[in-house]
Image (cartoon, rainbow, N blue to C red):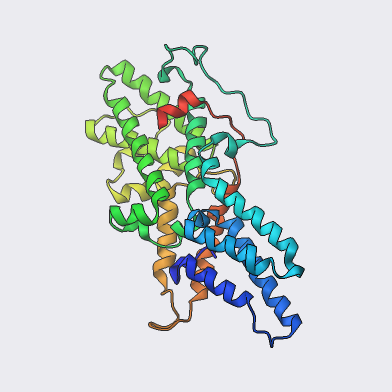
Amino acid sequence: MWCHRNFTTSDILLQKLIECFNTPQEMSPNNTTRIQKSVINTLKFWLQECPNDFLQETLSLSTKTFIEYDLSKETQHSNYSRELKLSLKKCEKLLSKQEDLLFLYQKSAPPPEPQVPRNIFSPDFKFESVPEVEIARQLTLHAHHLICLIGMSELSSVAWEQSSGEAEEKCPNIVILENWLQRITMWVKEEIKVATERKMRTKRLASFALLCEVLFELNNYHSLAGVLQGILMEAKASGSKELPSVFDKEWAKAPQGEEQLKFLNETAIPTVFGQRPKYHVKPCVPYLTDFLGTVSKVIKSEPHWIMEGSKMVNFNKALKLSLFLKQFREFQTHLYSLLPVHQVQEYFE
């Protein structure tokens, strides 16, 4: 289900499922029940694992029609009908709930008390007075919130590599998260750049070094990459050698452009923190650029069809791709036990 848009559309897939459900009258009752249950379970999985697909109005309406008419008339499936109606309602409410950070981060484990200055509710409140630990937490909440908005269908193609207009249309949430990474990078770069005095510059660099350490502990590699790139960009632009002691001398050899992204994941993070990103530890916000690169290789390695011009889907490729999408789904479902601080969140937006 995660990969279906590589070879069809959501509307056509639903239509085919409905056709399968409405079996011929001459079919035996046992076979009819077996096929109908398979269709119901497929639709149930689709609703639960790809809820963003049903934010599309036509698909949501067609699904509702199928549940209320085709499924409801089969009395032996009445329980499934109620269950699917409930799942569809959850999908319809998803968009409004996704805008509420508290919806995403309410957990049974008690979250730590936010570390904020006493004047957090005062007009005199300044972002600079927030401790690095809390900035890292809020960056993590915001990044994970954006990760949760990405639908599986956005990841099952390489639309993010197309022109900006096509990318925004086919994978808008990926574009938003990638743009947010650039905003973090430019924020860090400008904060260091405006610190012209040596003492202030050293203090600012040390602050970002601490921020990096906390982001790494939180497994927030996407925001971490943005902060590291900002430090690197300003160091390269100014020719400065005043990087904090936590960073190794190898940073001076860091490449530019796309190679810099590979350098961050394969060299920089292990050099600074002594180990590679721990994607197996959850909760986690993956370095999206790195993750998309891996998915892109899988998609481009084989054709979507077994033979060019045929209608035989290459399920071997779909299986390989689904393993990465399953991992990404785990990133979305393992939530952080942290409380949002709206005064800080507003600064990121």
Q: Left or right: where does residue 185 sit relative to residue 28?
A: left
Residue at image coords 57%, 51%? 91
Against 119, residue 166 (above or below) is below
Q: Is residue 169 above or below residue 210?
A: below
Which image quadrant for residue 227?
top left
Does residue 103 appear anywhere in the picture?
yes
Residue lying at the far bottom in this picture: please name it: 26
In the rendering, at what x and y percent does residue 154 appear?
Answer: 44, 57
Is the C terminus in the top left, top right, bottom left or bottom right quadrant?
Answer: top left
Nearest the eye: 10 or 266? 10
Please, is residue 257 above or below residue 344 in the view?
below
Q: Nearer the viewer, residue 95 or 154?
A: 95
The residue depicted at 32 percent of the width and 47 percent of the height is 260
The reply to whether residue 271 is in sight is: no
Image spot of residue 228 (x, y percent): 38, 37
Q: Quadrant of the N terminus?
A: bottom right
